[in-house]
Image: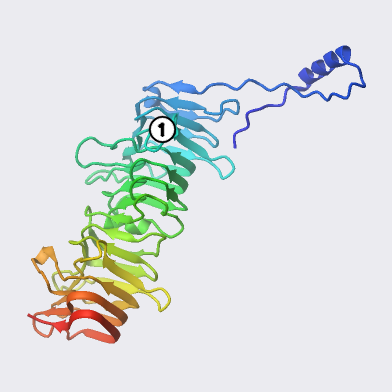
């Protein structure tokens, strides 16, 4: 924490005591105290301050070390030391355009860095946008970021919003950023916007607390949703959903897991598992889907080496819940040409209508099976389905389906075929 007072020097103290001795009696019982040093105002930074390399230091005599009044372009390497407090004027913020230079905002548990607004109201300053940030050492740690999100971080498509956003790049040097022990609170929009980052990005996130914001805590691509895990808390926002967006919806050449979080996942559209992609949804996770959203473990061929899998691995105490966000309908699961053993165990599948826009399939089933996919399904409840639980297309579509202990509750039909 900041210390606003300093002990005066020994010589100064000696002079002070001598004066007291000369002016006061020894028996007056009054104990003297050293004077406080005068607190100083923050340093107001010019808009071109960050065009060169900078180190921002904590001054114990300044309750707020720096103020920033513009949308500052950060082009030089930047290091912010423990205990620094920076306040931003209305709509001000940081446009991080570092290229391969490094950014290090690294506080400590005892002396966190604070990035705030000059006015403590939700959505007062603009936030931080990482446009070009390629250095693998880019780091924000033990930092509190509050009252940002006054307006979108970009003015043209693709739009990024929120307190902090990392731009997705394609065909250039990957982006890089590590977040650890970061608090993002009281924003006027979403917390983090990572909706276009790809798997080539060097991104990590742990021990985050994202609360009090007016949007979802996180927007993220399906390709990189696994970066966020249950070391963090995402609850206490206006929209308490971990939002998986429609950008970069494919899980390819990856083995990833979606853990149980303290908020439900919200899937906006298609999540396509293909070409050596492997997704595990862990026990206790709740996945909500918008009406046209669905999971697609489907490669399109049986070529050797094109293996893929979806494993939904709940437990008796913590089943995985797949349900409609609107309480009415979502697509379901579309399996095809899968060579690996897909497993759905201890799951609850609700409201799946069997609508899959990619194949113009409508009113089919919660589990659509094409080209005899391999699937083992056990200890699972199908609930409130207006159509079928299983819908098979082609010759012997259920040939590689193994089931046990399934419950059908308010289901139109159990097994269907055209």
| Residue in view at x 24 percent, y 43 percent | 172
| Residue in view at x 28 percent, y 83 percent | 407
| Residue in view at x 21 percent, y 79 percent | 411
Q: Split into 4 quadrants, where in the image is the C terminus?
A: bottom left
| Residue in view at x 26 percent, y 62 percent | 325
Q: Identify the element where label 1 is drawn.
A: loop
Horizontally, residue 327 falls left or right of residue 26, namely: left
Q: Position of residue 401 (x, y in %)?
A: 22, 84
Q: Is residue 68 above or below residue 413?
A: above
Depth check: give the residue in front, 277 or 406.
406
* Residue on which the image places disc 1: 77
Q: Position of residue 208 (x, y in %)?
A: 45, 51
Depth check: give the residue in front, 242 or 254.
242
Give residue 48's quadrant in the image: top left
Give residue 214's quadrant in the image: top left
Q: Split into 4 quadrants, where in the image is the N terminus?
A: top right
Q: Position of residue 152 (x, y in %)?
A: 28, 37
Residue 347 visible in the displayed image: yes
Residue 337 visible in the displayed image: no
Horizontally, residue 8 falls left or right of residue 43, namely: right
Horizontally, residue 231 falls left or right of residue 408, namely: right
- Neighbor class of circle 1 (other Cα within 10 Å; few <14, some 14-19, many 20+) is many
């Amino acid at each position: 924490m900041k210390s606003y007072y300093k002990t005066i020097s020994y010589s100064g103290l000696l002079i002070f005591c001598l004066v007291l001795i000369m002016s006061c009696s020894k028996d007056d019982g009054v104990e003297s105290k050293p004077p406080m040093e005068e607190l100083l105002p923050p340093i107001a930074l010019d808009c071109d301050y960050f065009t060169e390399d900078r180190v921002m230091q904590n001054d114990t005599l300044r309750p707020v070390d720096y103020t920033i009044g513009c949308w500052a372009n950060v082009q030089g390497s930047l290091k912010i030391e423990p205990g620094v407090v920076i306040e931003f004027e209305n709509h001000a913020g940081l446009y991080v355009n570092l290229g391969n230079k490094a950014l290090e905002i690294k506080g400590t548990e005892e002396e966190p860095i604070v990035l705030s607004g000059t006015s403590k109201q939700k959505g007062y300053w603009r936030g931080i946008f990482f446009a070009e940030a390629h250095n693998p050492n880019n780091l924000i740690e033990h930092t509190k970021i509050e009252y940002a999100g006054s307006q979108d971080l970009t003015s043209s498509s693709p739009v990024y919003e929120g307190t902090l956003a990392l731009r997705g790049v394609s065909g250039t040097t990957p982006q890089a950023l590590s977040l650890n022990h970061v608090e993002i609170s009281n924003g006027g929009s979403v917390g983090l916007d990572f909706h276009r980052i790809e798997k080539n990005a060097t991104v990590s996130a742990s021990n985050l607390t994202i609360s009090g914001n007016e949007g979802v805590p996180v927007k993220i691509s399906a390709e990189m949703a696994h970066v966020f895990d249950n070391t963090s808390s995402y609850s206490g926002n206006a929209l308490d959903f971990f939002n998986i967006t429609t950008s970069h919806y494919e899980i390819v050449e990856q083995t990833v897991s979606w853990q149980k979080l303290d908020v439900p996942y919200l899937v906006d559209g298609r999540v396509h598992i293909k070409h050596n992609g492997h997704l595990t949804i862990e026990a206790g996770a709740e996945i909500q889907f918008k009406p046209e959203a669905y999971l697609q473990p489907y490669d399109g061929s049986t070529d050797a080496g094109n293996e893929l899998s979806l494993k939904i691995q709940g437990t008796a105490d913590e089943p995985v819940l797949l349900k409609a966000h609107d309480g009415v309908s979502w697509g379901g699961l579309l399996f095809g040409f899968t060579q690996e053993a897909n497993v759905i165990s201890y799951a609850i599948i609700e409201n799946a209508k069997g609508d899959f826009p990619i194949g113009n399939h409508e009113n089919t089933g919660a589990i659509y099976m094409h080209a005899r996919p391999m699937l083992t399904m056990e200890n699972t409840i199908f609930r409130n389905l207006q159509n079928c639980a299983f819908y098979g297309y082609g010759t012997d579509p259920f040939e590689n389906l193994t089931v046990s202990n399934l419950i059908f509750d308010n289901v139109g039909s159990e097994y269907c075929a055209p």
